[in-house]
Amino acid sequence: MSKITDLTAELARPVVEACGCTLWDVEYIKEAGSWYLRLYIDKEDGVSINDCEAVSRGVDPLLDEADPIQDPYTFEVSSAGADRPLKKPEHFEAFMGAEVDVKFYKAVNGQKNCTGILAGYDDGNVTLDMGGETVTFDKKEIAFVRLHVSF
């Protein structure tokens, strides 16, 4: 799968940047029996539907030409979202000091998730400031990390 997502990112990045956005992530996943190739984009003042459409129209013919996927799939372009997942080292670096939600594979200290201020990231290990207490979680324990959204 990484070959498909890497190639897609390589093809899409110039188009995304020409549209004034940044490429946040690419995923190729199977959901409910169908394959989806998704580009997640970001923009400093927010991503609009017009941004998604422009990126889609620019990348779609490049994918058709490169033809990296033999099976039928649905191509989507979306905003990374306010509660975007942090997956790559540069994601964690960009949001150091932000409030994040961490979900664990199995309970850690009796809890399946926690919220804290992102205080560190080292090779998948995540450090949070949780009310003045600094806690580091091993990457093997972490299912995902997302930006926290509060209303």
Image: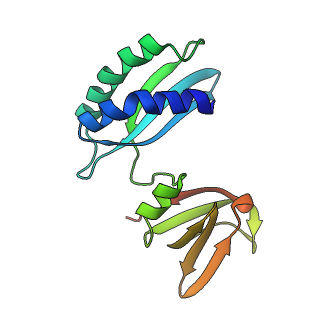
Name the quarter where the C terminus is drawn: bottom left
Whole-percent x, y for residue 80 in the image: 41, 45
- Asked whether residue 105 appears in the rendered view, the answer is no
Residue drawn at (61%, 67%) of the image: 126
Q: Is residue 48 above or below residue 35?
A: below
Q: Nearer the viewer, residue 89 or 26?
A: 89
Residue drawn at (41%, 61%) of the image: 94
Q: Is residue 134 above or below residue 28?
A: below
Q: Nearer the viewer, residue 55 or 110?
A: 55
Whole-percent x, y for residue 36 in the image: 53, 25
Q: Is residue 13 above or below residue 35?
A: below
The image quarter containing residue 4 is top right
- Asked whether residue 7 appears in the rendered view, the answer is yes
Q: Nearer the viewer, residue 111 or 18?
A: 18
Scheme of image coloration: rainbow
Whole-percent x, y for residue 104 in the image: 69, 60
Residue drawn at (51%, 52%) of the image: 85
What number of labels is visible?
A: 0
The image quarter containing residue 115 is bottom right
Specify whether 47 is left or right of 129.
left
Whole-percent x, y for residue 26 in the image: 49, 36
Residue drawn at (23%, 51%) of the image: 45
Q: Is residue 50 above or below residue 134?
A: above
